Image (tube, rainbow, N blue to C red):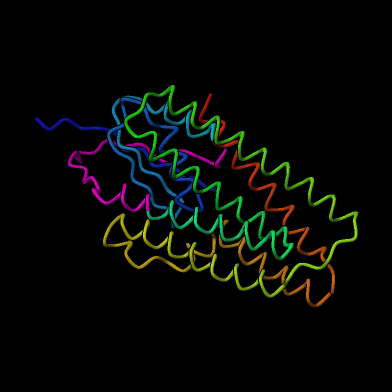
Amino acid sequence: MTTKINKTVFEISKMDCPSEENLIRMKLDGISEIKNLDFDIANRKLTVFHDGQTDLIEKSIMELNLGGKKISTEQTDEKDFEENNNQKKLLWIVLAINFAFFIIEMTTGIISKSMGLVADSLDMLADSLVYGISLFAVGGTLIRKKRIARIAGYFQITLAVIGFVEVLRRFFGAEKLPDFSTMIIVSIFALIANGICLYILQKSKSKEEAHMKASMIFTSNDVVINLGVIIAGVLVNWLNSNKPDLIVGTIVFILVVQGAFRILKLSK
């Protein structure tokens, strides 16, 4: 007699990129009833294969404040879940890309006096921390994972607060204009890097998703931020003012802090 398990589908409205996927994986890690997680980032859906009730799973997803909502639960005969042996390797590649652009954008942001680039570099760092926690905590105890998440969250908030202070100083002080051409060029490369990260991670899911939908790329927060810095660079040159750069920088710092609080939720 074939033992059936439950298949519950969740809609995660704020799951824009693989960074959120890793947050959810870490949050649900340790729930013994879960047999497999199947993420569909393009359609913002998560399918959980599990034994028993969904109460604990649903509660954990809701605590992340990613707009999670249970759609359906049904029984299924599916039990042979295909493990992706390349998943860890792909995560290392994405971590390396994000961390490299954190260094590139932080360096060029400081040199070009662009708070937009500095803020975007912290967003890249935030993604790196999420991938890093997911990798370094593999096989570790729950206490260890929570400790790493707590350190990463507070570190991220500290950097964002320093960024806010610098934005205020530049807003009320007499600062030179940021180098708009550096803002635009570096952000274009960061945009390409984010597209590559999304592509290789989504391609690894299944053959059906090998050709990632364009809509998925352009709904990602990371890509929207890159476009925002590019637009700010154009406006800096057009208006001969550093205010567009400071405004975009402030918005991105807020997003970085929100991401930090999500990481801190994992430490509770």
**The N terminus lies in which quarter of the figure?**
top left
Q: Nearer the viewer, residue 137 or 213?
A: 137
Residue segment shown in magenta: 65-92
Q: Quadrant of residue 240?
A: bottom right
Direction left: furthest residue: 1
Q: Nearer the viewer, residue 117 or 254?
A: 117
Direction top: furthest residue: 143
Counting from the top left corner in percent of width and height, residue 124 is at 55, 53
Image check: 88 left or right of 42?
left
Image check: 180 left or right of 169?
left
| Residue at position x 73%, y 43% in the image | 162
| Residue at position x 38%, y 48% in the image | 39
Counting from the top left corner in percent of width and height, residue 164 is at 76, 46
Assess whether residue 84 is covered by the magenta stretch: yes
Relative to 8, residue 248 above or below: below
Assess whether residue 48 is covered by the magenta stretch: no
Counting from the top left corner in percent of width and height, residue 61 is at 48, 34
Image check: 202 left or right of 233?
left
Counting from the top left corner in percent of width and height, residue 138 is at 34, 34
Relative to 69, residue 169 above or below: below
| Residue at position x 47%, y 40% in the image | 23
Q: Quadrant of residue 30?
A: top left
Direction bottom: furthest residue: 238
Relative to 84, residue 53 above or below: above
Q: What is the number of callouts on the image?
A: 0
Q: Quadrant of residue 170?
A: bottom right
| Residue at position x 51%, y 53% in the image | 16
